[in-house]
Image (cartoon, rainbow, N blue to C red):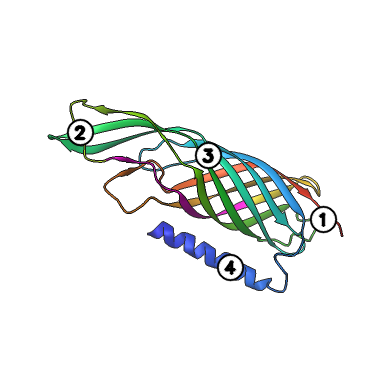
Amino acid sequence: MKRTSFIAAMALLCLGANAQYKKATFFQRGHKTYGFTAGMKMFNDGVKPAANINFTYGNDKGRNRIFHWWDLDYTMASKYSYTSAASPSGTATVDGKAGGFLSIGYNWAVYLLDNKKEENKVLPFLKIGFTGIISGRKYLGETVTPVNLSPSKVTEFSGNLGMDAGAGLLYKINEQIGFFGNAGYRAVYTGDNHNNYPAMSNHPYVNAGIRVLIKAEE
């Protein structure tokens, strides 16, 4: 609940910053951005961290502090382990592996410094994002110890929608190329069956890579 409240607070903070720049038209033509980043998703509750790579495409006008981008992200397979009450009696340990998955995300951000000033080579920002799974995690097999027990929990591979909040940094090498990174916390909707074990849980994440800006014609 506290983490969800944190994400909501971050969203309100970014929206408040947007109000300060409401005279700027967000959807007017701007500079296009393309990038490639790699990172890690630190899943909770016994799911091992999973590496991810993604391609980014967005819009950064360079005239106000608001910018946005899309992510096409592939997350690698990862292992998981949990314990469960079992029948006929006792506790069982379940070890398994969940497959990789493909997702698409939309991110909206605001620079904390004036990006129009050329001397500001380092531009920190706040962001909020929304994620949807295109191709979900798949079951790649699991084992139960002891083998004669039947766990009451079932591994759940849902979690098709997520919302996150975080912060990041753009370091401009020159007018077109920069190092780009961000980190945050993502809340994932995993359905209403809390007796199951989610292989896709709420998690912190971090990404870093290169962003290229293609200026629009004046």
Q: How would you rate the neighbour count of disc 2 (Cα within 10 Å): few for under 14, some for 14-19, many for 20 or more?
A: many
Q: Is residue 167 magenta?
A: yes
**Position of residue 138 measured from the top left corner of the image (x, y, whole percent):** 42, 36
Residue type of the residue flagged with mark 1? Ala
- Which disc, if any, is residue 216? 1
Determine the residue located farthest toward the front in the rendered image: 135
Do labels 1 and 4 touch, CB within 8 Å?
no
- From the image, tell me which residue sits under label 4: 15
Residue 121 seen from this side: no
Q: Which residues are magenta?
A: 154-168
Q: Tell me the kind of residue under disc 3.
A: Met
Query: Mark 2 is on which residue type?
Result: Ser
Residue wearing tag 2: 150
**Alpha carbon of mark 3 to alpha carbon of mark 4: how far?**
27 Å
- The residue lying furthest to the left in this view is 88
Front label number (3 vs 1):
1
